Amino acid sequence: MTRFHCAHAWLPGGVADDVLVEVAGGRFVGVRAGIPVDATEAEGAVRLAGVTLPGLANAHSHAFHRALRGRTQRERGTFWTWREQMYAVAGALDPDSYHALATAVYGEMALAGITCVGEFHYLHHGPGGVRYADPNAMSEALIAAAADAGIRITLLDTLYLTAGVGGEALQGVQLRFGDGSFEGWSSRLDRLRGRPHVRLGAAAHSVRAVPAEVLAAFAERTDGMPTHVHLSEQRAENEACLAVHGRTPTELLADHGLLGGRVTAVHATHLSDTDRTELGDSGTGVCFCPTTERDLADGIGHARALVEAGSPLSLGSDSHAVIDLFEEARGVEMHERLHTEHRGHFTAGELIDAATVAGHAALGWPHAGSIAVGARADLVSVALDSPRTAGCEPAAIAFAATAADVRHVVVDGRVVVRDGVHLAIGDVGAALAEAIAMLSDRATNAERIGATR
């Protein structure tokens, strides 16, 4: 048994002081508040200063997008310059380079207190869409990367068949995303196997990438699995869907049975009142990614209205313009303030729940995200004496802390980060720089070769 003594800990009932936590077999077996640090029961316990939270869950990630950070602002940085560079990175990756990049990215997540990631994975095949000898080589690279970084992963294997709502064919780098048919995707999915740190889930990329006639079969195939879908991220998606189907994307998913408690709609930015009612009445979750949504100028979604309609809220870092779930949590509230011109839409507790227990539930880990007996033993200690958090009340940490304030991270009872250092990877910044530089060289060389043809 391992014991931790938390100066302050975020328990299901709120913040408590002097909390002694006991761990065995990767689970919490004892959680007691009011135990002084010098008490006999606390002898030998690892002391965690600051406020200790449950593990954070990043419910929406595209790991390879991390290579774009700080590189997509050519001229004024439009969506199209961003997409051009995103495709260049996607075209340069192979299983080995993806493993190196994803390990560093997941290491950055661990440093930020993220103990579980939902990887919305659609970069499946080699150049031209040619399958690797192992058709799931890219998936396996991600699964291994999560293990090497010491975090859990829900692999949301993504169906991606068309380039637009009208059924346009994939071309160029997009060919790497597609399996040719629903059957091809399904048979490849059958070959994946879960592991102790892995949950297998699925995703329909969007109504642009999955034809309407396939949605019902996809919903049936993924029944019982955590299932995610990009939904109404941009107005153009809604307009195209209405033009082709006479329905909003949400209505189209509802028509084909792709809503419900196991489903999470990512972004859900441009919704009608009817859309919000459909999502809430069915218990469909929503995942907001404020730092990406503002980086890409997608717009401001209405999280409060969705939560009140009945949709559980989770959070993701998506394109990794920032990897900081405190910033994502604050972004939800601050975006609502900008839209409505008044404060106080979400409590700190609601935001922490979105970043912890709700995020884990959306990823198929229902026994994670809380410091309670029987739950997975994830702990994230956050400093209360940094320049950002000094003077902050522990219960208000969501409104002051950043990822840089995370000091100690435990995942399933194993210490992954100690005193702000990743124990397995060491210098995560150097690992990121090396992986991104290699990809940048490959992408540049590919552009040069293409220009000479």
Image (tube, grey):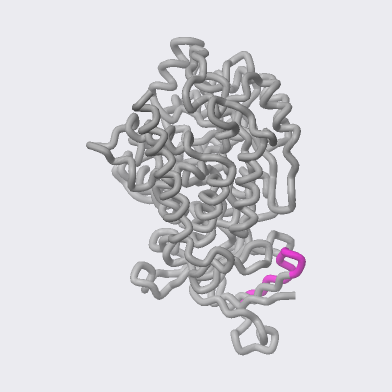
Residue at 70 percent of width and 73 percent of height: 22
Question: In the rendering, at what x and y percent does residue 66 appear?
Answer: 44, 46
| Residue 362 lies within the magenta run | no
The answer to whether any part of residue 161 appears in the image is yes
Question: In the rendering, at what x and y percent does residue 126 appear?
Answer: 57, 32
Q: Is residue 63 left or right of residue 146?
A: left
Answer with the quarter of the image where residue 415 lies: bottom right
What secondary structure is the stretch in magenta mostly built from? Answer: strand
Residue at 59 percent of width and 85 percent of height: 37
Residue at 38 percent of width and 47 percent of height: 69
Relative to 239, is 205 above or below?
Answer: below
Q: Is residue 267 left or right of residue 361?
A: left
Q: Which residues are magenta?
A: 24-33
The answer to whether any part of residue 15 appears in the image is no
Tell which of 208 and 74 is nearer to you: 74
Q: Is residue 347 left or right of residue 58?
A: left
Q: Quadrant of the N terminus?
A: bottom right
Question: In the rendering, at what x and y percent does residue 53 appear?
Answer: 55, 64
Residue at 59 percent of width and 31 percent of height: 125
Answer with the quarter of the image where residue 412 lies: bottom right
Relative to 452, is 296 above or below?
Answer: below
Question: In the rendering, at what x and y percent does residue 397 appear?
Answer: 44, 64
